[in-house]
Image: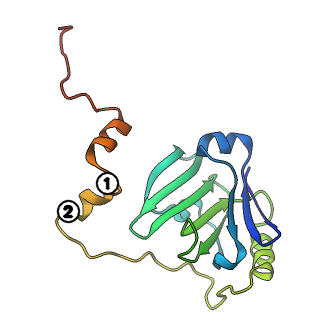
């Protein structure tokens, strides 16, 4: 199970070896100065935003990896049935949100992070909504492709062959 801790001037999301294998990455490290807001989300599924980019997504069991949305990317390590600590980050950070189900008391973790982070916004205990881009005819198609060329999406989905052979020919 993932854990959130503070090492020197960094916030570290330490993943278990299984979560590292599932997310295809090691621990996530961001500077404490990049932390904007820390909240607790009691419902694990509300912490998930956007669409899965890479990682493992087993509905009702485990969600680990990066998720993309119009506002950027989030990193999640979420298990159902546990409260989620949501750490909103400033635009200079590699992710917009870190959502982690913690083993300990979630509210105690949030209070500890609020004491450690220098310029945290404590004006509201709620997460801020994602920015919504202007909608055009192609905006849904662009979101599905994540800004990548269409052939990369086909290759990723395993449907890159141009012609499908039927009947063993």
Judging from the image, what secondary structure is the residue with disc 2 in? loop
Q: Is residue 76 left or right of residue 134?
A: right
The numbered dot on residue 138 is: 2
Q: Is residue 166 left or right of residue 76?
A: left
| Residue at x-position 31% and y-position 53% | 145
Residue at the disc numbered 1: 144
Q: Position of residue 6 (x, y in %)?
A: 80, 68
Q: Position of residue 25 (x, y in %)?
A: 63, 47
Confirm or deny contact between disc 1 and disc 2 (CB under 8 A).
Answer: no
Q: Is residue 113 left or right of residue 121?
A: right
Q: CA distance from mark 1 to mark 2?
A: 10 Å
| Residue at x-position 56% and y-position 51% | 65
Colour convention: rainbow
Q: Is residue 116 left or right of residue 165?
A: right
Judging from the image, what secondary structure is the residue with disc 1 in? helix
Is there any visible trace of residue 94 in the rendered image? yes
Q: Position of residue 28 (x, y in %)?
A: 67, 58
10 Å neighbourhood of mark 1: few (<14), some, or many (≥20)? some
Taking depth in this image into account, of 1 and 8 the one nearest to the observer is: 8
């Amino acid at each position: 199970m993932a854990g959130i801790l503070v090492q020197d001037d960094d916030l570290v999301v330490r993943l278990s070896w299984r979560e590292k294998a599932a997310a295809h990455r090691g621990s996530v490290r961001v500077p404490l100065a990049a932390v904007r807001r820390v909240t607790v989300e009691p419902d694990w599924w509300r912490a998930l935003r956007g669409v899965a980019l890479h990682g493992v997504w087993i509905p009702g069991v485990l969600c680990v990896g990066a998720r993309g949305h119009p506002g950027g990317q989030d990193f999640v390590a979420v298990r159902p049935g546990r409260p989620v600590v949501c750490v909103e980050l400033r635009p200079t950070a590699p992710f917009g949100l870190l959502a982690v189900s913690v083993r300990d008391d979630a509210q105690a973790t949030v209070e500890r992070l609020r004491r450690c982070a220098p310029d945290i916004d404590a004006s509201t205990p709620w997460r801020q909504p994602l920015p919504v881009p202007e909608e055009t005819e192609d905006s849904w198609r662009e979101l599905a492709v994540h800004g990548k060329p269409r052939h990369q999406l086909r290759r990723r989905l395993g449907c890159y062959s141009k012609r499908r052979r039927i009947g063993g020919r």
